[in-house]
Image (cartoon, rainbow, N blue to C red):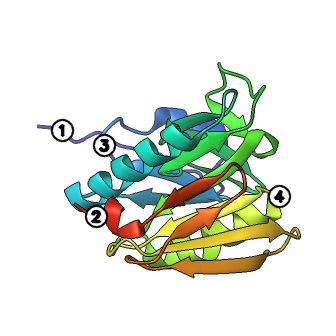
Amino acid sequence: MAQPTYSFPDYWGESDLDVLPDDGHRYEIVDGSLLMTPPPSQGHQSIGGNLFIALRLAMPRGFRGLYEVGVRVPGGNFIPDIVVLKPGAPRVAVWSESCDVALVVEMASRSTRVTDRTLKAAKCAEAMIPSYWRVDEDGTVTIHTDPDGFEYTRSQVVRPGERLRVDAPFPVDLDPASLVD
């Protein structure tokens, strides 16, 4: 049986994503390079689902929480685990503009840990996304806020057993232990 052949560009752009297979992998672009991550584990999905529900329950009218939607950032296209859009953000966009995003959340896993801590946080800060959260496999939540265009200027780490309390983009109060089944 013949195998399909692919022609890969030297520099990846958003339109190149349309020709990639719908195979369960997440394809993202950073500065012309293609990033591919495997489908998430059950633990990853469980933590993400629990946090998504907590955020939806805390979310004021007008904000919209979405799971695995596209966001444009300078030099790239990301598909974060959770995105909270600001009131008034377009509802039909395939790729949301970063100016419409209030919060990006990434669930770190073995395959994404380094990228989530460094590259994605830096690109979200450059995009001036007000809040970037990273949730580790044990439920620890690292909250980055106040982007200055190059990096987030404030960070807070909240571990299971402690209370996570934030006011932005809207008030959220939870124990990260509740995220882990």
In this orientation, which residue lies closer to the viewer: 93 or 64?
64
Q: Earlier in the sequence, mark 2 or mark 4?
A: 4
Q: Which residue is mark 4?
A: 128
Q: Visible in this render: residue 159? A: yes
**Within the image, what quadrant is residue 168 found in?**
bottom right
Q: CA distance from mark 3 to mark 4?
A: 29 Å
Q: Earlier in the sequence, mark 3 or mark 4?
A: 3
Q: Earlier in the sequence, mark 3 or mark 1?
A: 1
x, y (%) of residue 112? 43, 70
Q: Earlier in the sequence, mark 2 or mark 3?
A: 3
Picture layout, residue 115 above or below residue 46:
below
- Residue 178 horizontal side relative to residue 172, left or right: left
Label 3 residue SS: loop
- The dot on residue 180 is 2
Which callout, 3 or 1, points to the residue nearer the camera? 3
Q: Which residue is mark 1?
A: 2
Q: Which residue is mark 3?
A: 24
User: Which amino acid, mark 4?
Assistant: Met
Label 2 residue SS: loop
How would you rate the neighbour count of disc 3 (Cα within 10 Å): few for under 14, some for 14-19, many for 20 or more? few
x, y (%) of residue 6? 41, 44
Which image quadrant: the C terminus?
bottom left
